[in-house]
Image: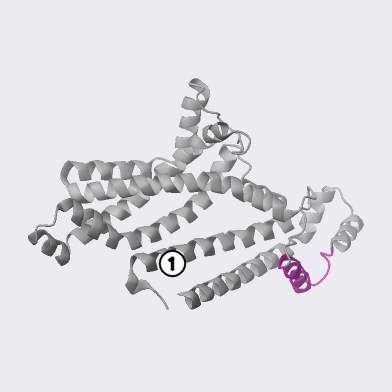
């Protein structure tokens, strides 16, 4: 397993290298536009050229990338073009906000999906139809519409929860819980719609297998068959779906954080892209790849633990 982990980490590092290079090459075509944005559209060509030279943006693009990469490997991702704040602490603080939304949402989604999927697959009939109805509801309702509806109901009319804004856990744990409640609900509804259907489908397949019929003929209780045997065998695909759901939620943060004015990773990425903030965009790309690599690696290790046949030595 250790050689496998090393290979995956090396592959993740290579992927980060390729993606940051692609991002840098794409950004390199817009250095002049970024300079004009900083100076204003009325800036003279001379002033624009002077800024390009001062920033080092007039040099060959590959030379600039190699210098950025060498600094990044030492933990220096540069500073924002517009705020002059160091990129690394800003990205980490924004990432902490995003993870404070995604982690609770993912845990709740996984719990509800497993319960709903197992319940539907083992009971069938009306219970199965109800579970599928819940999944369909989550699919058809737009996340943005759900977010607006929850804000109007709980934030504006009832006043139970804040409509926008974010409270850090260290400042006020109760306030933090209230500030993330609506965004988490929005993420959970979409997540359960997808994951519960996957769990249900896998459990239905497992309960139809020969070993299940054999266990039943031996007098093993249905509860034991479902929880100790079928669910364990269905756990590996469920973990894969869970990792994909984490990535989906990470992408959904781009919309959620802008709707609720949360100072998270998605909001930071959105603003940096609009402004053409080159150091921030590179830092975001790097940490996005690293996070996805870590999640996929953790999923593979967990799958190896659940299913010995999947282990790689």
Which residue sits at x=55%, y=48%? 99
Vertical comparison of 289 with 117: above or below: below
93 relative to 300 in the view: left or right: right
- Magenta stretch: residue 66 in it? yes
Q: Position of residue 165 (x, y in %)?
A: 61, 34
Q: Quadrant of residue 283?
A: bottom right
The quarter of the picture where the C terminus appears is: bottom left
Q: Position of residue 246 (x, y in %)?
A: 47, 54
Q: Residues within 10 Å of mark 1 (few under 14, many from 20)?
A: some
Q: Is residue 65 visible?
A: yes
Q: Is residue 254 visible?
A: no
6 relative to 119 in the view: left or right: right
205 relative to 196 in the view: left or right: left
- Magenta stretch: residue 74 in it? no
Magenta region's main secondary structure? helix
The quarter of the picture where the N terminus appears is: bottom left
54 relative to 246 in the view: left or right: right
Which residue sits at x=68%, y=60%? 282
Vertical comparison of 250 with 22: above or below: above
Q: Which residue is mark 1?
A: 301
Q: Secondary structure at mark 1?
A: helix
Q: Position of residue 184 (x, y in %)?
A: 48, 40
- Of residues 222 and 9, the one nearer the viewer is 222
What colouring does the structure picture have? Answer: one colour
Which residue sits at x=50%, y=72%? 5
Vertical comparison of 43 with 180: above or below: below
Q: Which residues are magenta?
A: 56-73
Q: Position of residue 241 (x, y in %)?
A: 39, 58
Which residue sits at x=32%, y=50%? 114
Q: Quadrant of residue 11?
A: bottom right
Count the numbered circles shown: 1
């Amino acid at each position: 397993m250790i050689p496998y982990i090393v290979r995956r980490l090396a592959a993740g590092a290579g992927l980060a290298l390729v993606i940051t290079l692609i991002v840098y090459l794409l950004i390199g075509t817009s250095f002049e536009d970024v300079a004009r944005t900083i100076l204003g559209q009325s800036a003279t060509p001379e002033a624009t050229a002077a800024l390009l030279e001062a920033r080092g943006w007039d040099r060959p693009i590959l030379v600039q990338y190699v210098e950025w990469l060498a600094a990044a490997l030492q933990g220096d991702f540069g500073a924002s073009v517009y705020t002059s704040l160091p990129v690394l602490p800003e990205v980490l603080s924004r990432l902490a906000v995003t993870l404070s939304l995604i982690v609770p949402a993912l845990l709740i989604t996984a719990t509800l999906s497993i319960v709903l999927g197992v319940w539907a697959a083992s009971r069938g009939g009306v219970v199965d139809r109800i579970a599928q109805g819940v999944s369909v509801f989550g699919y058809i309702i737009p996340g943005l519409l759900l977010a607006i509806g929850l804000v109007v109901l709980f934030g504006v009319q009832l006043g139970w929860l804040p409509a926008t804004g974010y409270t850090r856990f260290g400042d006020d744990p109760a306030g933090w819980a209230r500030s993330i409640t609506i965004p988490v609900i929005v993420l959970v509804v979409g997540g359960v719609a997808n994951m519960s259907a996957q769990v249900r489908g896998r459990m239905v397949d497992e309960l139809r297998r020969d070993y299940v019929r054999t266990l039943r003929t031996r007098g093993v209780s249905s509860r034991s068959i479902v929880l100790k045997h079928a669910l364990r065998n269905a756990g590996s695909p469920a973990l894969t779906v869970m990792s994909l759901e984490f990535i989906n939620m990470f992408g959904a943060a781009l919309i959620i954080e802008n709707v609720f004015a949360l100072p998270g990773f998605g909001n930071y990425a959105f603003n940096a892209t609009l402004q053409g903030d080159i150091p921030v965009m590179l830092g975001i790309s790097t940490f996005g790849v690293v996070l996805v690599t870590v999640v996929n690696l953790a999923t593979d290790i967990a799958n190896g633990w659940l299913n010995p046949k999947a282990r790689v030595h």
